């Protein structure tokens, strides 16, 4: 019986493995998986078991009866639901003890543009009959690193999020919560709505950038159509533009602003403040 972590070549999966080691889980009880197993070599050197694992072509023999599987949602939008279903089918065949899936806020009851893939995956997991835990992860503070770099150059944060707020937390916070949930009991069939403790506005974001950069930074709110035109002008493709403007609309609607306190509860400490993460980019 092991804790199998997918996406361990990515940010969240890697930090979840580190979190498990920090919590005292024996390296030999962890299986870190990814598409490029060579990128897990340093973990193997520390005694963590590593295995190649592609959601599109799930290998036999990696998952075993009774394992706890941390399924990190994939990054190939448009192919994810089918890929996640492959993993769920393999988990059923292997007799996995529990699937922990990284989902999105209010996955089954929201107009958030990224929600349909997560809702379909949650449904597949529920329908599998396997015990499960859904980690409905809110927004990563790290999503704003590019905005920070732009602000450093231009002195502006440009978005069409209106007065919307974002209750973000650091990726490390979500990863630590995942480590807690996969390595302890009492989370069977639980759905956690995870958010940062503070919902900040884009004015707050600009003020934080200004403080860290030591220069003036202001929020320049655009109407969605203006934003769309600016992004197209900057050379982004239609699909990406729709996605970015759609997410800003969702932010304006307040869909990312809900502070639930559930992340802090799992961590047993406050979530990482916005400014602390921003300072690491300076
Ligand atoms: N809440 C948020 O703000 C937010 C922001 C961004 C993303 N996300 C979601 O959360 C997930 C984890 O975030 P992250 O920051 O760790 O993303 P990330 O650094 O891009 O890592 C994604 C991981 O998923 C793996 N993966 C993707 N497709 C796969 C497939 N077909 N088979 C096996 N592995 C596959 C990647 O493998 P490779 O290294 O081989 O590519 C990588 O290890 C993302 O994949 C995305 O679904 C959430």
Image: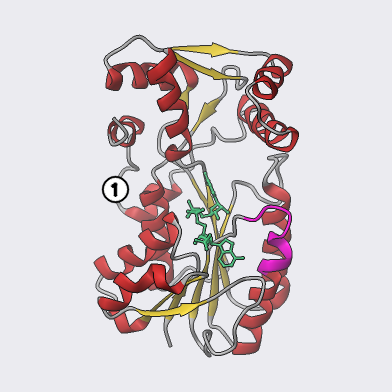
* Residue found at x 72% / y 62%: 81
Q: How far across and down, in percent of the image, does residue 249 sit?
A: 67, 27
Q: Is residue 281 above or below residue 118?
A: above
Name the residue tied to disc 1.
269
Furthest residue in direction front, as rendered? 235
Q: Nearer the viewer, residue 102 or 181?
A: 102
Residue 57 falls in image quadrant: bottom right
Q: Which corner quadrant holds the N terminus?
A: bottom left
Q: How is the image coloured?
A: secondary structure
Q: Position of residue 26 (x, y in %)?
A: 28, 80
Rendering quarter of residue 148 = top left
Image side of residue 261 versus residue 228, left or right? left
224 or 255, nearer to the observer: 224
In the rendered image, the vertical position of residue 197 relative to residue 79, given as above or below? above
Q: Position of residue 160 (x, y in %)?
A: 62, 20
Magenta highlight range: 76-84
Residue 149, position as x, y percentages in the image = 41, 26
Q: Secondary structure at mark 1?
A: loop
Within 10 Å of the Cα at label 1, are there few (<14), some (14-19), or many (20+) other Cα atoms?
Answer: few
In this orientation, which residue lies closer to the viewer: 95 or 223? 223
Tell me which residue sits at (24%, 73%) in the image: 24
């Amino acid at each position: 019986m092991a804790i199998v972590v997918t996406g361990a070549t990515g940010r969240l999966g890697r930090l979840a493995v580190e979190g498990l080691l920090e919590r005292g889980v024996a390296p030999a009880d962890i299986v870190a998986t990814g598409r490029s197993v060579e990128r897990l070599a340093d973990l193997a050197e520390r005694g963590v078991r590593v295995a190649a694992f592609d959601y599109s072509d799930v290998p036999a023999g990696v998952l075993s009866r009774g394992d706890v599987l941390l399924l990190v949602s994939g990054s190939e939008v448009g192919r994810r639901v089918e890929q996640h279903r492959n993993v769920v089918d393999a988990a059923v065949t292997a007799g996995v003890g529990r699937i922990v899936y990284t989902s999105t806020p209010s996955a089954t009851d929201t107009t958030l543009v990224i929600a349909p893939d997560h809702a379909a995956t949650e449904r597949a997991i529920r329908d599998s009959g396997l015990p499960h835990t859904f980690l409905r992860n809110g927004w990563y503070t790290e999503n704003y690193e590019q905005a920070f770099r732009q602000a450093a150059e231009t002195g502006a944060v440009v978005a069409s999020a209106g007065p919307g707020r974002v209750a973000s937390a650091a990726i490390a916070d979500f990863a630590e919560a995942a480590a807690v949930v996969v390595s302890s009991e009492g989370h069977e069939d639980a759905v956690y709505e995870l958010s940062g403790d503070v919902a900040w506005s884009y004015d707050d974001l600009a003020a934080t950038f200004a403080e860290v950069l030591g220069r003036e930074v202001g929020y320049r709110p655009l109407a969605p159509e203006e934003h769309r035109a600016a992004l197209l002008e900057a050379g982004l493709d239609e699909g990406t533009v729709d996605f970015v403007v759609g997410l800003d609309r969702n932010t304006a609607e307040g869909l990312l602003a809900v502070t639930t306190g559930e992340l802090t509860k799992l961590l047993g400490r406050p979530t990482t403040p916005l400014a602390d993460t921003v300072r690491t980019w300076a």
